[in-house]
């Protein structure tokens, strides 16, 4: 039975979702008479969920309306995004080969994300990635989001491992803090979504391509003798 688990962030780590997140955000902004935001803006705004993405998009395009309630716009965002969830989203290079190798070598795999659990499952299925993961935990799963460590621990628990050893793979300060709060090592990728370089947050390893990930995982989470 596996005793090692690798827990991945989703947006900006497993999958480049920025094109579809941008389309959904601009759909809402257009309805509010705002200019569209660009890809660089989206990449710096993602990471704390869709409500944060929308409010940051509004702040960047003229400011938040007085007494602004994000919920109606959030519902419009989710409805549009759900219908267009994988139009331009793609796994990052080398990801599928890494997941296949980890699965072959007996690692248990899960996703811990600040994307809603249902949308996460929908996206993973659309990209044929769901087959790799034994659990998916979003902010709505427990009613708490990263960097609180409870979603990470829940993802590990749902894998059903005995005496599990785990690490986090992510792209942002949120993921680094999640790992630190959970007391586990963390590997960071620099190609995701963060307003500051992820190296500044002190991950245990920084990899530039998923081809480098397996060696880093084995180094941080070696097999028991």
Image (tube, rainbow, N blue to C red):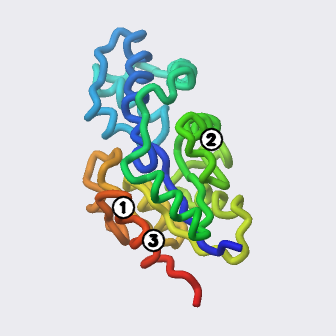
Q: In this rendering, does residue 26 appear at all? A: yes
Residue 185, given in percent of the width and then of the height, sits at: 46, 72
Cα distance between the residues tagged 2 and 1? 28 Å
Whether residue 54 is visible to the viewer of this picture, yes or no, is no
Q: In this rendered view, identify the residue nearer to me: 224 or 203.
A: 224
Q: Residues within 10 Å of mark 1 (few under 14, many from 20)?
A: some
Instruction: Return the x and y of residue 60 as percentages of the image width and height.
Output: 28, 27
Disc 2 target residue: 117
Residue plotted at (35% across, 9% down): 33
Relative depth, front residue between 126 and 5: 126
For label 3, the crowd category at 10 Å Cα-Cα, with few meaning under 14, some 14 to 19 and many 20 or more, is many
Q: Where is residue 136? Give x, y as percent.
A: 63, 49
Mark 2 secondary-structure assignment: helix
Q: What residue lies at 58% left-to-right and 62% top-to-bottom? A: 103
Q: Residues within 10 Å of mark 2 (few under 14, many from 20)?
A: some
Say which label, 3 or 2, has the lower sequence index.
Answer: 2
Q: Position of residue 223 (x, y in %)?
A: 55, 82
Kindly report the distance in space between the C-alpha atoms of the residues bearing marks 3 and 2.
Answer: 25 Å
Q: Nearer the viewer, mark 3 or mark 2?
A: 3
Q: Nearer the viewer, mark 2 or mark 1?
A: 1
* Residue picked out by circle 1: 211
Which numbered disc, 1 or 3, marks the residue that appears first in the sequence? Answer: 1
| 1 or 3: mark nearer the eye | 1
Q: Which residue is labeled 3 in the image?
A: 217
Q: Reading the chain from its start, which is encountered first: label 2 or label 1?
A: 2
To which quarter of the image does residue 216 belong?
A: bottom left
């Amino acid at each position: 039975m596996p005793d090692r688990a690798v827990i991945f962030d989703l947006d900006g780590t497993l999958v480049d979702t920025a094109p579809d997140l941008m389309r959904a955000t601009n759909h809402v902004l257009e309805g509010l008479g705002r200019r569209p935001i660009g890809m660089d803006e989206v990449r710096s705004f993602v990471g704390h969920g869709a409500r944060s993405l929308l409010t940051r998009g509004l702040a960047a395009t003229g400011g938040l309306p007085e007494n602004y309630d994000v919920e109606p716009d959030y519902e419009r965002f989710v409805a549009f995004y759900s219908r267009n969830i994988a139009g331009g989203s793609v796994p990052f290079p080398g990801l599928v080969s890494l997941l296949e190798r980890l699965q072959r070598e007996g690692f248990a795999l899960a996703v811990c994300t600040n994307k809603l659990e249902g949308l996460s499952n929908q996206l993973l299925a659309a990209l044929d990635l769901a087959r790799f993961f034994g659990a998916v935990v979003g902010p709505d799963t427990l009613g708490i989001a990263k960097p609180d460590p409870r979603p990470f621990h829940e993802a590990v628990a749902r894998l059903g491992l005995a005496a599990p050893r785990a690490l986090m793979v992510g792209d942002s300060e949120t993921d680094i803090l999640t790992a630190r709060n959970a007391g586990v090592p963390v590997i960071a990728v620099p190609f995701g979504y963060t307003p500051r370089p992820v190296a500044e947050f002190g991950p245990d390893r920084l990899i530039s391509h998923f081809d480098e990930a397996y060696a880093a995982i084995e180094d941080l989470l070696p097999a028991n003798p």
